[in-house]
Amino acid sequence: MFEEIPMNCKYAYARVSSKSQQDNSSLESQKQEFLKLGVPEQNIRVEVGSAAENIKDRPIFYSLIDNELTQNDLLFVTKIDRCSRNTLEFLKLQERLHKKGVTFISLDLPYSNDMAVNKLISTNLAAIATFENERRKERQRQGIQAAKKNGKYLGRKTVITKKLIAQVQDLKENKKLSITEIAKVTGKGRNTIYKILKEELNYIPYNRLVKATKGETNETK
């Protein structure tokens, strides 16, 4: 069906939350879906980043939108949550692409050749997905509260390990990478990298994170 749509070029965006997912079939399965739809491999953009992060912290995705996509292009994703966390974000993205004349297709949603119908379908289903996600979060909160009450809740397992701290320190102090660049290399969220720099490696925020002296460290604690 997509082959019948007149398009200058097909692009696709794939996202995984961490390097551990990147190492398994998650990323590869996304790529294979795109290739079957006729997306050239060189037009598939890949990003590693947590879904909990601010959508604007996905530089590859926004570079694709701002600098590569042009009128009559077609953009594929496998699922809505690869590029938006809630209905509001999805609506903003949809409007942004609409203004550029780019057709957006999420493979987990029904599709119509009538763009107005397609927009209505995707908007309504995005709203339902957001509603279901909020219900799931609420059930999780209730489960955590019940576990705490019964003394069985141990909290989330931290992703911050001695190995990760050492890696972040090397990337920051020896390789001189930014927080965003460190997040890409490690496959961790920017918030996690920021927390390690601030709480584990004694960096303090001025205009940017800088290494604190012993006196500054004591004052800021």
Image: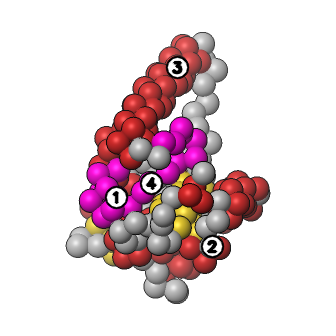
Q: Are marks 3 and 1 in contact (CB under 8 Å)?
A: no
Name the quadrant containing residue 194. Answer: bottom left
Work out whether mark 4 precedes mark 1 in sequence or the reverse, and give the earlier one: 1
Up the image or down, 89 lies above or below 77; here it is above
Question: Residue 148: percent from the left, percent from the top?
Answer: 55, 19
Regarding mark 2 in the picture, which secondary structure is present there? Answer: loop
Work out whether mark 3 precedes mark 2 in sequence or the reverse, and give the earlier one: 2
Q: Mark 4 sits on what residue?
A: 104
Residue in view at x 37 percent, y 72 percent: 70
Q: Mark 2 sits on what residue?
A: 40
Q: Tell me the amino acid under the disc marked 3.
A: Arg
Instruction: Please tell me the numbered disc located at residue 97.
Output: 1
Q: Mark 3 sits on what residue?
A: 139
Regarding mark 4 in the picture, which secondary structure is present there? Answer: strand
Judged by depth in the image, the label closer to the viewer, 3 or 1, is 1
Residue interval drawn in magenta: 94-112
Q: Tell me the amino acid under the disc marked 4.
A: Phe
Q: Residues within 10 Å of mark 3 (few under 14, many from 20)?
A: few
Regarding mark 1 in the picture, which secondary structure is present there? Answer: helix
Q: Tell me the amino acid under the disc marked 2.
A: Pro
